[in-house]
Image (tube, grey):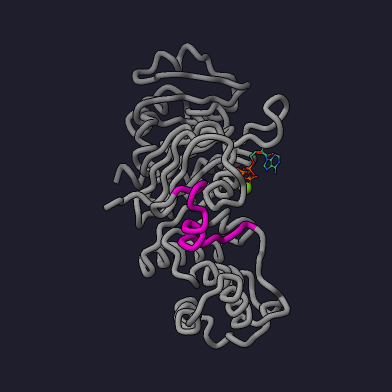
Amino acid sequence: MNDIAIETRDITKRYGSAANGVLALDRVSVAIPKGTVFGLLGPNGAGKTTLIKLLTGIADITSGDARVAGFDVRRQSLAVRSRIGWVAAEVILDDEFSAWENLWLQARLQDLPDWQGRAEQLLRYFELSDRKTDRVSHFSTGMRKKLEIALALLHQPEVIFMDEPTIGLDVSTRRMIWEIVTGVHREFGVTVLLTTHYIEEADALCDRIGIIDHGRIIATGTPSELKSRVRSDVIQLESKEPIDPVRLRALPGVQDVRAQGNEWQIRVPSADEFLPRLFATIQTDQIRRISVEQPSLETVFLELTGHRIGSDEPMRDIRKFYAQVRRARG
Ligand SMILES: Nc1ncnc2c1ncn2[C@@H]1O[C@H](COP(=O)(O)OP(=O)(O)OP(=O)(O)O)[C@@H](O)[C@H]1O
Ligand SMILES: [Mg+2]
């Protein structure tokens, strides 16, 4: 009994020639257990879509091995294709067709007999039954996304690939898709491999995450395993007047102090223990802004790669910050 749904061993993808091509994936090895949601988290150009293309057989593997749903991607591609579904980043629906006609088309493309019962079940599950005969061009973005997922599930795949399932969606639609992904995986027992460059998405959705950068998987683990790799809090402080760095470094617990003008980054094992000492040293009216960055996937990424995936969190307002500190002290 094999409990692994997706396994790659040192797969590499080079687009173009060895001399001046692009090394999009560099010896990637992952093992994704059946029935889990695995997230590939990385910035633009990291190689996320390329990995999906290799695993679905859309692009050729340059070297290395991959198995999906128990079959070798290179040697048993038909067996793999019949067991996987794919939700592409770009829209694949036919706008002129109704929801039902899109399902019919999908069934034709995949040569599925007796697909109607399953299609009805999926429409019910995605709460689209009453829109069954409406043209897809009249659907909202969220409804379209649901229908795309329904198409990918029509042939009862064991594994489903979702490339940036929520890219460009507003926050509430994004959350709806998160619920759908979790629900689909629970309801239909499929293994999900999704790609994202949204940290909160990986954190909220995935059982395990692979962090990918420049074609390499640089860390894998559950969100909390990854976060526990970073053991310190970072205090971001903006002062009104210059502060003597010697005073900051002398405070007990300080691991590192970096300054850029009047903006300070102070690394400490625990912000809760450190802040009272800081406030005893610096007058609070000297502080323009302050925030605490606790270990997050963002800081993990930063620590591993030296750069950020997304944009910086704005520094919190100092009054809100004090309110929070007061609450924490209870
Ligand atoms: N068909 C192609 N021909 C040549 N180079 C390619 C091709 N497809 C992708 N690449 C290159 O491979 C690298 C990885 O691209 P890929 O699309 O896998 O990244 P990604 O992680 O999906 O990025 P994004 O978040 O922007 O979708 C990039 O440098 C890209 O330019
Ligand atoms: Mg991509």
> Which quadrant of the figure has residue 86?
bottom right
Asked whether residue 82 is drawn in magenta, I would say: yes
Whether residue 284 is visible to the viewer of this picture, yes or no, is yes
**Image height of 226 relative to 20, above or below:** below
Vertical order, 102 against 224 (above or below):
below
Residue 257 lies, with reference to residue 276, above or below; the image says above
Residue displayed at 73% across by 79% down? 96
Image spot of residue 173 (x, y percent): 56, 66
Question: Picture coordinates of residue 222 (x, y %)?
Answer: 36, 44
Q: Residue at x 48, y 56 (%)?
A: 80
Q: Residue furthest top?
A: 246
Residue 78 drawn in magenta: yes
Q: Nearer the viewer, residue 184 or 179?
A: 184
Q: Position of residue 161 (x, y in %)?
A: 51, 56
Name the residue rendered at 35%, 42% in the picture: 224
Query: What's drawn in magenta, residue-wise?
Result: 72-89
Residue drawn at 62 percent across, 47 percent down = 59
Above or below 290: residue 201: below
Q: Quadrant of residue 226?
A: top left
Q: Is residue 312 visible?
A: no
In the foreground, 56 or 128: 56
Q: Nearer the viewer, residue 146 or 174?
A: 146
